[in-house]
Structures are given as structure tokens and as C-alpha cells.
Image: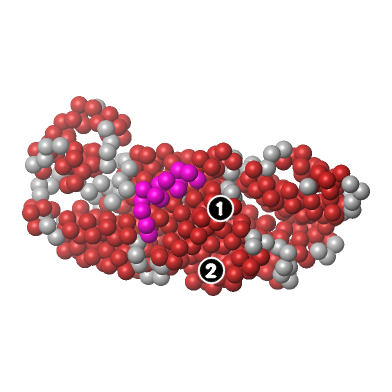
Amino acid sequence: AARLIVGHDTTPAQRVDALVALIDASGQHLHGADELFAAALHAAAGRSDLTAQILIRQSIWANVNEGDPHRACDLAGRATDLAEAVGDTTTTAMALTMRARLQRVLGHPDTETTLDHALSLPRAASVPVNSTPQHLAARHALFDDRPEEARTALLPLLVEAERMGDAEATVDILRSLAEAELRAGRCARALDHAQRAQALTDGTALSPAPACYTSALVEGTAGRTDLALAHARRGIDASRQEDNRVFLSRNLFALGHLLLVTGRPKEALEALEEVRDLEELQQVHDPSVLRWHPELAETLIALGHLDQARSLLDDTRRTATDLGRDAVLPALERTQALLDAARGNFGTAARRLNDAAGRLRLLPLERGRTLLALSHTERRGRRRASARTAARSAADLFTTHQAHPWAQTAIHTLGRLEEAPTDDDARPRLTSAEQRCAELAAAGASNRDIATTLTVSVKTVEATLTRVYRKLGLHSRVQLAHTVTPAHE
């Protein structure tokens, strides 16, 4: 249909409209992008307003498929200048919104100024709601842990997207709503939004990568972990096939998070290190956009790579502070506490976790995860009563908010603490070397992996584990995994 229009004696605006419609409809399946953009720019015949519309699409392509947010931001800036020069407020708002989106990723100080400018311009009914500054403002509220504000802004946008019959926009708004509800602790609503987004995606042949990412996060917190893992893996496969670098990072992050919290740190490390590499390649500077940093640090701690974890935490904390991203800090503090505990500083770790939990009162699931970490830390520090209190609070939070997988974990932890025969206070104390070795073995590391991590011989590892088994009255690694709390817990 586009070729028919372009091949006839039509106006530049009609030819550009046809080519832009083709670009927009292609989504991530666009082949021959360079030629198509060149044809569109030729059809624009030098008109600033039409050229600006094409530059916005080039900006999206540069960000998602080329993984080059700096070039994408420059393209959006050029589109802004051209549209403003001819007084096209609709295209100006779209270009400013894209520019603000990229500035946030790059950690640019003018992000909010750019977004405010876009918000001050009149809304055009022809612009998809997921391309509006209103939607981006809601996304920024999510990044800054203001889920109620995000939800309030998103609900009318959902009504508008559904009324217009725009499937892609509807999926994007549903995904954002799912994230907002999850942050606020309303798991049932989050699950409903995520499932609607997934069903609409599958029913309209949209790229599955975005909906799979959201489904993996929500299912892993509110539904079934096995289903969450399946969504993440499907999203990774789709992203690789489509060369969508943005959602490859996100789905890998979801996979790494799920593997970490289900006790598979070695597998989690592979996924999360790829996220780190992709984010560095794409020059993502703002740590609030995709919060992989504390997850990777926690994985490194679980595997005994303490110096690497410390370096990552220090760098991320410095960046978050410089950019004013305070929302990132509690999760970093939780992970720092796990690092303290891995080094035997249980009192410092407990104080840090109590402080972080206090700062997360409006984010119940994050608070519950922090209390669960506090329970494990207090248990390792031989403060069993405090460990029970923290585990009970975490179980109550997760149960109240219908975070079923987390609730099961907290209830299991509480049950172990309430079993009198396994009183930790009566257990022989391990030396720091024995404790480190036992934790790595409990996390699933092989003797050779443990030897590499601790810079000792395999024979030393074998001898150390033999002493651990004798002290604790154990006979196998299975028993060890149920007795020794790995550092990542």
C-alpha cells in the first residue's frame, strides 16, 4: 500500500505519511531500515516538519536496534529544532519526549527541563498515548519510586489507548500499570495488567519482548516462578531475533533476578553480567532505569566475589548520589549489608538492614525482601529471636500483598527458625574460612570453583569441608545446603 502511494503523483506529505506509517507498523521487524529512512527523507523534499517526523523514528531505531542513545538523543534534538522552527507543536512535543527519554538514560541534567517543555505543549489527538510526554512522566515517576503518582497518570491514558484501538499503546500502558501496582504492593492487580498485556501482545502479533519482560517480573513476584522463567527466556529469544537491545537487557535482568532468588547464583551471574555489558555498551548511566546493579552485586557476594561486589556497589552509589536518584539507595544498602555479613560484620549488617527497611515503608515488597535479608543476617549472627521477628514480619507483608513465591520463602524461613532441634545457638562455631567455604558449597559451587574463589588448592577445600561436616554433624552437600545459610540469603 505504501508503494502504491509513493509511486503515484502524490504530495510530499502524503508520501511521508505512507512511509512513516510503514515504519511505525513494522515495529521491530523492519528490514532495510536505512533505505526506508533515506526514501522518507527524500520524499520530505526538505520540508522541516516532515523531516522532523522522520528523525524521531530514526532516533527510536538508533536507541532500540543500534543501542546508541547518544546518536538517538542527537537525532531527537535535531527533530525538535526543525519542528519548533515551523511552529509544529505536535511534532515538537513528540521530539522533546523522545529527547527526554534518552536524556534520562544518559543521566543528563536537563532531563526534567526537556520533559516539562514537552508537557507544556498542547496534546494532539493523533499522537499515540505511549509516545506522549504524559506517559513518559509516569515512567519517570516509576523510576523514582512514586507508584501512586504513576498510576494516577496512567489510568486515563489506558482508557484513551483502548478507545483508539491502539494495541501497541495499550500494551505499553498496561505494562506500566503492572509495574506501578507491583511497586505499590498490589500484586493481584499487577498480575491482571500483565496478563492482559501478554494476551493482547500474543493476539496481535506484536513483539513479545516487552510483555514478556513485565510478565516475568510480575509472575516471579505474584504468581509462579516457573512461568516467570519461561516468560523471561521467551523475551530473551525474541529480543535476540529482533536485535532489540533495550529489551534484551530487560529480559536478561528478569532472568538473572529470578535465578538469584531461587538459589541459582552461578546461572544468575551469567545473565546479569551480560546485562552489565549491554548497559555499558549502550552507555546507560542512570541506575534507576533498570536496577540490575544490586542484583549483580548480591550474586557476586553469593559466589564469594566480595571485592567485585564492593567495587560495583561503591560505583553505583556514587552515580546515584551524583544524579539525585535516592530511590536506588535502599536496595544498594540491602546488598551492602549482605556484603558486611559475608565478612562477619553481622551487627553492622543488621543496623544497615533495619535502616533500609525503615525507608521502604511505602514499597511493601521491597521492605519484605529487606526484612527477609535481615532475618537471615540475624540468624547467622546467632540472634535467633530477632531473626524470627524479622521473618514473621516479612511473611506477613508478603502474604498480605499476595506475593505468593516470596511468602512461601518467608514462611519456610520462619518454620526453620521455630524448629527447636536445629537451634543455631547450639551449633558449633565455624572459623571464618570454614564459614566462607561452607557458604559457597551451600550455594552450589564445586570444590574447584571454591578453590578458585578463595585462592586455595582443591585439597584445602576438601579438608575444610570435611571439618565443616564433622563440626555440624552432616554427611552430604544436600544437608549442608539446608543447614548453612548462603551469603546471598
Decide whether residue 232 is among the magenta residues. Answer: yes
Q: Label 2 sits on what residue type? A: Ala
Taken as a whole, is the magenta stretch helix, strand or loop? helix
Q: Where is residue 111 shown, x and y percent of the image?
A: 63, 61
Can residue 349 be seen here? The reply is no
Q: Residue at x 84, y 61 (%)?
A: 85
Q: Residue at x 40, y 65 (%)?
A: 188
Label 2 SS: helix
In the image, residue 267 sits, relative to residue 414, either above or below, namely above
Q: In the visual, does 196 lie left or right of 7? A: left
Along the line of sight, the residue nearer the viewer: 431 or 28: 28
Q: In the visual, does 142 lie left or right of 59? A: left
Q: In the visual, does 256 lie left or right of 396? A: right
Q: Alpha-carbon distance for marks 1 and 2?
A: 27 Å
Decide whether residue 98 is among the magenta residues. Answer: no
- The label shown at residue 32 is none
Q: Label 1 sits on what residue type? A: Gly
Q: Residue at x 37, y 63 (%)?
A: 365
| Res. 453 image quadrant | top left
The residue singled out by tag 1 in the image is: 203
In the image, residue 395 sits, relative to residue 57, either above or below, namely below
The residue singled out by tag 2 in the image is: 150
| Res. 448 image quadrant | top left
Instruction: Tell me, yes or no, whether the two marked residues, 1 and 2, touch with CB atoms within 8 Å.
Output: no
